[in-house]
Image (tube, rainbow, N blue to C red):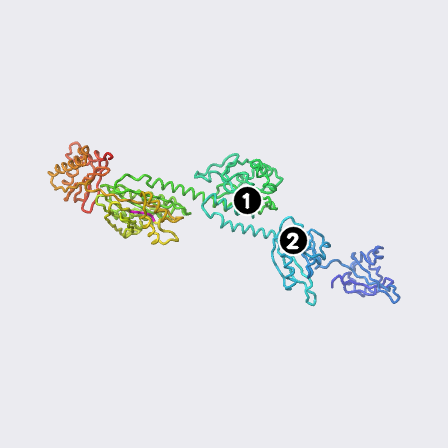
Amino acid sequence: MEQASAAAVIDARGIVTGWSEGARTLTGYPAEEAVGRSVAALLAEPPAATSVAALAGPVVLRHRDGSPLPLTVRACAVLGADGAPDGYVLTADPGPTLAEQAFEQASMSLSVFDTGQRYLRVNDVACRVMGVPEDVLIGRFFPETVEDAEHSRGFLRNLRQVVETGRPVRYDSWAGAPALNREHAWSIEMWPLRDPSGELTAVALAAFDSTEQYLARQRLALLNEAATCIGTTLDVVRTAEELVELLVPRYADFASVDLLPWVLGADELPQDPEGEIVLRRVAHGSVTEGAPDAAVHLGQADVYPLSSPPVRALRSGRAVRGQAGEPDFVRWVADRNARSPEGRPHRKGVHSMIAVPLRARGTTLGVAVAVRMAHPDDYAEDDAVLAEELASRAAVCIDNARRFARERSTALALQHTLLPRGLPGQAAVEVAHRYRPSGSLAGIGGDWFDVIPLSGSRVALVVGDVVGHGIASSATMGRLCTAVRTLADVDLPPDELLTHLDDLVTHLASDDTGDEVAELGATCVYAVYDPVSRRLTMAAAGHPPPALVLPDGTASLVPMTSGPPLGVGGLPFEAVELELPEGAVVALYTDGLIEDRDRDVDHATAELCRALTASADSLDALCDSVLKAVMPEEPSDDVALLLARTRALGGDRVATWDIEPDPARVAGARQAATDQLAAWGLEEEAFVTELVVSELVTNAIRYGQPPIQLRLIRDRALICEVSDGSSTSPHLRRAHAYDEGGRGLLLVAQLTQRWGSRQTGSGKTIWAEQPLPPD
């Protein structure tokens, strides 16, 4: 039984005549021991006179165990028939009940409203939140006690909803309070109170301050957002801007990112600087448009002293916090104001800052600074942990962007070194070329092209593509380009050259111990054009077929069978041969020109053929118009384009004689060559030409097989060719003092600009070139 039911009845003489069960529980005396005794015998000390006069006040009883029992007692007189007191009923007030104590001492804000939204009860926490005592609130209408704001109107709507529906309501709110200097997060629950008959008589509510939990969720959400919004590009500056955009305004009123200068260049990692540190501003942002509170302009370098928070953060590798009143913080703000006086009004109210280093893979890249002005809270330890985590993620993205930029510039420089910058002189074709590196995140690819002069005024055109991107692909491109030039110097037919190149790639791949082999999957198209016969012979290894534009303006792809990519091995390559009119344009290109994720290859190829027929002042202009019309706006792969307009050497520039396999015919061959040189006005070349013709024809008669043919070609050089039916290639050898032969080819090599041999379908051809003066 509760203590509130403790009661005793005494008569006018002070004798106990009644005793309740509550009195027994309170004092320990049963009714049989208390009734009939004087009330004075139950007191541990006489009551105060004021208490007796007022019939209420504190008294001290003696518990049955002898211990004193302080109580507050109230007496109520029992009147007789004459109106005089015949006795008194004494009731003990033991203080608030457990339920009342729980209400008052709760750690959350508790309130009770009547059905008209007027205060009935509030606990101590609610009074502290409202900033007024309970008696000021009791009976007042809720809207009269708060500001007219959306969160207050929402609170009132929910109170009324509980009254109207009789159902509890639970919701979260981010709001301030009259006695709090900033907004807090509240988890609020309202529920109806009913009397024994079930009628709704009041609404109770509990408001739990969940600010810490709310801020923790906000920090977690910020980290999750950082994983998706920082590092969307492999650009150092853009990555820094993404970090600033994430911090402002949720975490800071102003934020900046400063990087060490070497991060923005292609230099190697420098040594740690001593003393003051120079940092370059790459990004900043503010709650004020235009960031007028920035003391350093974008792109500007600034010198930070040792005592400044950014340098301390760089040196320690940890976040450094500063608050108003601290000496270092005061000096830092004063330095900012001195550097940029015009921003002083916007820095008014700066009260907290945090500087956190940007470190990735053990390397310090720079520092991020966050400042609070309008935000009421100073940066706390949890904020420092969050800043370090955000800075760590951003630093990895910045370092990735730095490494990508460095690798891209290295690969591009390597490609520019390997690709032909000035094409060699030759008269067979007029050429123009374009190379566009990829702008994708994958990096520079391995596209390449070359124009290789061959013997007999012929020229080789080659375009290739290496699978993959980056330095490895560029290095592979260099290996293949060198291999093609070497094989072209042997003067192999296109299909045989690709066969040898395929074997080489397979060999290189088998020697590579890495997980990825860049050579595998490389493609190539190799074409040889002969301006004398006007024949174009070509073969492809997994490469798109060239396009051909005839002088009449028609354009089409060359019908050919493309073999497998290089490195597959075991499959043949087929060559196709065309006879072209003078002025035809051959377009060789890589797949980056016509292939893209959202593009139909057939449609792109048709666009290429249509673009090649467009009118252009020059072959270079045609290159530009083709790229503009066909190349994707943002190509995901490198693009190489090589255009060649054919020329022809007419009969007036070529002379051919069939030679009988008789040594006596050598003199006639010499004379025929001399007469032809005279007709061409090249009498000064006659002496060397006679010697070359004599030696080459003599060797063909002596060591070769019929048929034997002599051909002179007047091009940029004077070319002498002797063909025979033997496949045995000649070679230089050192003749001893008494040898009768062995000096012919040595003399040819000494007197001509270059010489060599090539295999033909019916034997071989020995050739030698002599320089000619320009026309």
Task: Report the disc number at residue 172.
Answer: none
Quarter where residue 200 is shown: bottom right
Q: Which residue is more in the foreground, 673 or 201?
A: 673
Contact flag, marks 2 and 1 (Cβ < 8 Å): no
Magenta stretch: includes residue 613: no
How far from the left and from the top, in percent, is residue 336?
Answer: 57, 37
> Residue 122: horizontal and vertical position, in percent?
70, 56
Q: Which stretch appears magenta?
A: 586-590
Which residue is found at the position 41% from the left and 47% from the top? 440
> In screen coordinates, is 6 left or right of 712?
right
Amino acid carrying mark 1 in the image:
Glu
Q: Residues within 10 Å of mark 1 (few under 14, many from 20)?
A: few
One can see residue 60 in this view = yes
Q: Which element is circle 1 on?
A: loop
Q: In this view, does 347 lie to the left or right of 734?
A: right
Q: What element carries label 2?
A: loop
Q: Where does label 2 land, which residue?
A: 148
Vertical side of 213 occupied by 491: above or below: above
x, y percentage for residue 416?
A: 36, 40
Dot 2 amino acid type: Asp
User: Above or below — where is 284 with respect to 177?
Assistant: above
Decide whether the magenta segment is chiefly helix, strand or loop.
strand
In the rendered image, the residue lying farthest to the top is: 737
Which residue corresponds to mark 1? 289
